[in-house]
Image: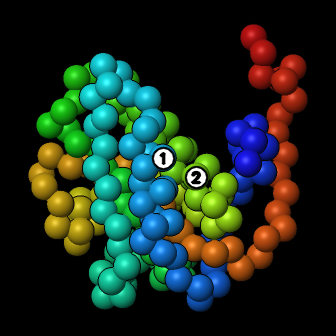
Amino acid sequence: MDVLNAIKSRRSVREFTDEDVSDKQIESILEAGRWAPSGLNNQPWKFKVIRDLELKKKLAECTHYGKTLMNAPVSIAVFLDNSGVYDRTKDLQAMGACIQNMLLATHASGLGAVWLGEILKKRKQAEKILTVPEDCELMAVIAVGKPKNVKSSSSRKSMEELML
């Protein structure tokens, strides 16, 4: 898939079929995140793949979008590894690039995903549920699956509105 086409056609998917997501597909998504740009190439990310139903139930209680988490066959928690941070602003920007790479790779593979950021309101609770090292700070949870509804549209501000 052409990169610009992937960027323009990617949508947040919140409803998924019951079809499973293979380990190979997840590895490809993680690989895309791994290759995101980062300052000094410090690669400040860590990932946790979530398939376990009980774990998903507990995590779903941390977000208004719990139904989406439960509906997705797999979710990926994305963390900032604070042990390797050298400039917080640059590293947070790298985390956004990492997550965007993962979303684009998901879309290009024919799967759908949604970036769940609202869960950060209960970040500490989610981190405890996911039993991650203290240095790991949750940045997002990405719900992944085969899209139930394929058609979706979106609009953007005109280029003139965005220019200074």
Which residue shows up at 49% across the image and 80% down it? Answer: 73
The percent position of residue 117, horizontal first and vertical second, equals: 47, 55
Give the residue type at disc 1. Ala
Quadrant position of residue 26: bottom left
Residue drawn at the location 31% of the way across and 43% of the way down:
45
Residue visible at 63% across and 75% down in the picture = 146
Q: Height in image: 96 above or below 93? A: below
Instruction: Between residue 54 and residue 37, name the one nearer to us.
Output: 37
Could you tell me which secondary element the residue under label 2 belongs to? helix
Which label belongs to residue 120?
A: none
96 is higher (above) or lower (below) than 41? below
Distance of mark 2 from mark 1, alpha carbons?
6 Å
Within-10-Å neighbours for mark 1: few <14, some 14–19, many 20+: some
Q: How many marks?
A: 2
Q: Residue at x 57, y 73 (%)?
A: 145
User: In the image, residue 53 lies at what x, y percent?
Assistant: 36, 87
Crowding around mark 2 (Cα neighbors within 10 Å: few <14, some 14 to 19, many 20+) is: many
Establish if 130 lies above or below 44. below
Regarding residue 123, the answer to whether it shows in the image is yes
Identify the mark nearer the N-term, 2 or 1: 1
Q: Circle 1 is placed at which residue position? A: 32
Image marks 2 and 1: residues in contact by CB distance under 8 Å:
yes
Quadrant for residue 129, please give it.
Answer: bottom left
Left or right of residue 151: residue 39: left
Q: Position of residue 153 (x, y in %)?
A: 85, 57
Q: Which mark is residue 105?
A: 2
Left or right: 71 as drawn, with respect to 136: right
Q: Secondary structure at mark 1?
A: helix
- Rendered location of residue 47, percent (x, y): 32, 56
Q: Name the amino acid, label 2.
A: Ala
